[in-house]
Image: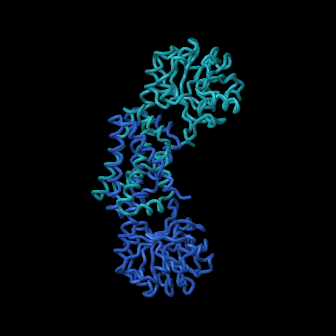
Chain colours: A cyan, B blue
Amino acid sequence: MTSSQGESAQGPGTLRARPVGLVGLGLIGGSLGLDLQAAGLEVRALVHRASTAERARERQLAQRIDTDPAVLQGCGLIVLALPLDRLLDPSEALLAALPADAVITDVGSVKQPVLERWQPLHRRFVASHPMAGMAEAGVEAGIRGLFAGRPWVATPTPGTDPIALAAVEELAALLQAQWLTCAAAAHDQAVALISHMPVLVSAALLEAADLGGSAAGADALVRQLASSGFADTSRIGGGNPELGTLMARSNRDAVLKALQIYEQQLKQLRGMVETHQWEAMHERLRHCRMIRPDFLRD
Amino acid sequence: MTSSQGESAQGPGTLRARPVGLVGLGLIGGSLGLDLQAAGLEVRALVHRASTAERARERQLAQRIDTDPAVLQGCGLIVLALPLDRLLDPSEALLAALPADAVITDVGSVKQPVLERWQPLHRRFVASHPMAGMAEAGVEAGIRGLFAGRPWVATPTPGTDPIALAAVEELAALLQAQWLTCAAAAHDQAVALISHMPVLVSAALLEAADLGGSAAGADALVRQLASSGFADTSRIGGGNPELGTLMARSNRDAVLKALQIYEQQLKQLRGMVETHQWEAMHERLRHCRMIRPDFLRD
């Protein structure tokens, strides 16, 4: 893995030479459109529905917005800002409209399946993942400054065009994102551990509080006594069910591996409760308190 | 379980007739001292160390503060605001100093062991649990208004003196807490489900991210990519290790029962990933999103 601050990265200047194309104007695409236009770039966007195009024009998410893939003609870099399921199943019309000489990148939160699908489709494809918030979605969600200070991970392979990679790095730098590169497998395992598997851990907690409260005849009590700690721990488990399912589905192997490690740790902690190993448990919790700050953003 | 808003509860006026005694001036005791004095009551406090007494006097946490248990003489209601381990192992000097006619209550976060220990010790003991934040501790931690709008749970038994119970309800009402009563077993199972077990669930997540990152050669990557979702889910697992251990230890049976229910739910969710039951998983996550708001405080 290599990393550099966005502001120090020097791209080859590809971005300003030709328009940037966006496929999709949801949270990620819309935010890209706003920031890139503010930086003085020409932005063209392809969207699926006429109603989306109309609203996106009102919000001025790009200079040209159309439902006709021809809008992408002449673009030098195109960002596929599509939901993962649509990214993995691109339409023929989209594929036909992508200029052969353009740099193509994506924003999908799982990288191995995307590479497998897209690397054979376009010789200048670069797999990438800007890690920005996902609570909001849709044409109303895009905001200025979404990527500033956030990781933007690219997962190049030996077959990745280095000039294309540099162009995506230039894009990330322009948005003041924190540029990282790593292997797709490492990325997918990391996001399974810190994002996709925790959704299931958190969902099981909500289910346990619900079912355990009922079993104890304390349905109302568990709800009344739940405090900020439970709210925090259950937040991602009570989030978008489509997204949670899609992540588990598209990153299945890594999520299963992460769950195996998780269940092993929980089993050990349970064993300490069963066998009254309170000093050992205290030591484990002390270690948890020590390592947690490393996982927090400044 | 019964519940009532604090402001509508009418006690028998015990509180103002005689001084209120506090044993311990940490977060809970100190906050009680500040609020009760502000309400015009006379507050006397027993603390363990001379240095604590000195600092507590500077902070004016009570009108009289001493390390001599005799300070409790004449008190009509005494709140044992001690850590759970010290509450379960009271000193002979403390026991000898508790007036036989005073109402005695506690603030422990587990109720069955407290009842078993204290009901034989004092005929006017009432087991209670004001559910206030626990991030801070010590003589500097007490603040005004800690209990307002928060649940204050009492767990009376058939042997509980109803006049004593009413006095504790009057105390909760004065502090604008939300008064609840329930069986001690129901309380302990509820807090195991929404507070004590989740600490272990959250700690195992930190351990899994740490170990799983190492196993994938991605130690730095998991730390760099962890975002607000991971921060929330891991917060209580990275909290006070003494407190986490003490809760598991003192509420062991209920924590084990809660863990069993939790592990069963997680196993089912894992099974859905293994067998590609994406519609079933989506339905489970949809249910989680639906029930979570019931667990959140307005």
- The residue closer to the viewer here, B265 or B81, is B265
Q: Is residue B117 above or below residue A259?
A: below
Residue most extreme to the front = A50
Residue drawn 59% across the image and 21% down it: A78
Residue most extreme to the top = A100
Image coords of residue B217 (percent x, y): 40, 32
Count the marks: how many? Answer: 0
Of the 4 image quadrants, the one containing the C terminus of chain A is top right
| Residue A148 in the figure: left or right of residue B209 | right
- The residue closer to the viewer here, A280 or A78, is A78
Image coords of residue B34 (percent x, y): 59, 73
| Residue B235 in the figure: left or right of residue A27 | left
Q: Is residue A187 above or below residue A297?
A: above
Residue drawn 47% across the image and 29% down it: A85
Residue B16, picture quadrant: bottom right
Residue drawn 51% across the image and 80% down it: B21
Residue B175, picture quadrant: bottom right
Image coords of residue A195 (percent x, y): 46, 39
Q: Is residue A23 above or below residue A136?
A: above
- Can the viewer see residue A35 in this picture? no
| Residue A73 in the figure: left or right of residue B289 | right
Q: Is residue A294 above or below residue B66?
A: above
- Can the viewer see residue A11 in this picture? yes
Residue most extreme to the left = A275
Image coords of residue B206 (percent x, y): 42, 45
